Structures are given as structure tokens and as C-alpha cells.
Amino acid sequence: MHIILAVLGLLGGGLFWWYRLKILNEAAGDVLDGAGRLRGYFRRRKIRLQAEHSPLTAIEDPVLAAATLIFAIIAEDTLITDGHFDAVRSVVLHISSPKKADEAMIYAKWAFSQVGDTATVIEKTSPFLRQQLNELEKCELIDMVGAAAAAVPVSHHYGQRVRKLKQRLGLQVD
């Protein structure tokens, strides 16, 4: 009889510790799930803050940045027409494929409509372009702005915006 009691005692003790380990495993899983949710929350928060701040901070392609910048400068304080799109698209085609130029124009139109201020577009995109472009490419960007502006009527702020862009890109201002 005492052997049966010992076996039942061992079996009961084993079941008790098995149950305890099962509960601990579930608790550890809950902690890991919580840590994963917290990490996801912070990632989503970072992306949300970037998107709320400006669609310009999400730009990671120099072609998109250049198209947005050119479009913002030539479309400031004017009624936006198809001529503006065609002018920017024609200069962007010199540095990219037709498909990428179309994508850049769609993004440029959307980003400028979200921001609505040319000075902000210059402030947000020029550090990225300054880092990504060499001196020759920066001068070509200024020439692209001029070529696009020659194709459409521009605002009276055009010269001021180009000077500000040159300054922000680190070029010599006239």
C-alpha cells in the first residue's frame, strides 16, 4: 500500500510541477507578445509621425524629390494646369524612365497638394537632395527648374524660390 501511495505522491507532484511549468510558459508567452506589440506600436508611431509631419519626409528617391521640388516651384500661386505637369514631366524624363517620371509626377502632385507651401517643400527636400546629389547634379537640378519654368507662367516668387533652393543645396547664390 505504501508503494501505491508513493507512486500516487510522485504522480501528483509531477502533475503539480507540470501544471506550474505550463502556467509559467503561458506567462512568458504573454510577456513576449506584449513586447512584440509594444515594439510594433513604436514602429507604427514613428511612421505615423513621419507621415503626419509631411509626405516630404517619406521621400527616399532623388527623382521623386526633384519632381516634387520642381513642381512646387513652378506651380506656386498659379492655377495648376496640364502644362505644369507636362513641363515637369519633360525635364524629369531626362533623368529617369517614362514610367518612373509618371510615378514621380503623381507623387509630386499629391505631396504638393498635401503641403501646399513651396518654402516648406524646399526646406524638407533640399537636405535630402544636398546629400544625394553631387555638385554637377545640383546645377543640373537648377537648370531643370529653369527649363520647366520657361514652359509655363510662374509666380512672382520664382526668383526668390530658386535663390533659396541654391542656398539650401550649398550652391553659390547669384
Image (spheres, rainbow, N blue to C red):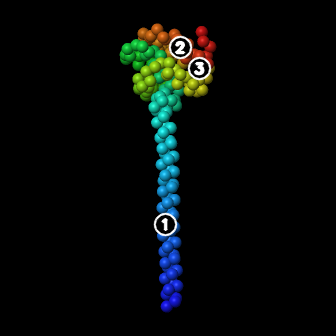
Disc 2 residue type (three-letter): Val
Residue at position x 51%, y 16% in the image: 144
Left or right: where does residue 173 sit relative to residue 4? Answer: right
The image's mark for residue 162 is 2
Pointer 1 local density, CA inside 10 Å: few below 14, some 14–19, many at least 20: few
The image's mark for residue 169 is 3
For the question of whether residue 120 can be seen, the reply is yes
CA separation in Å, label 2 and label 1: 68 Å
User: Disc 3 vs disc 1: Cβ atoms closer than 8 Å?
Assistant: no
Camera-nearest label, 2 or 1: 1
Left or right: where does residue 130 sit relative to residue 15? Answer: right
Dot 2 or dot 1: first in sequence order is 1
Dot 2 or dot 3: first in sequence order is 2
Disc 3 residue type (three-letter): Leu
CA separation in Å, label 2 and label 3: 10 Å
Between 99 and 46, which is closer to the camera in this rendering?
46
Residue at position x 44%, y 15% in the image: 76
Q: Quadrant of residue 170?
A: top right
Disc 1 residue type (three-letter): Lys
Picture layout, residue 49 above or below residue 80: below
- Residue identifier under label 1: 22
**SS for dot 3:** helix
Pointer 2 local density, CA inside 10 Å: few below 14, some 14–19, many at least 20: some
Residue at position x 49%, y 82% in the image: 8
Pointer 3 local density, CA inside 10 Å: few below 14, some 14–19, many at least 20: many
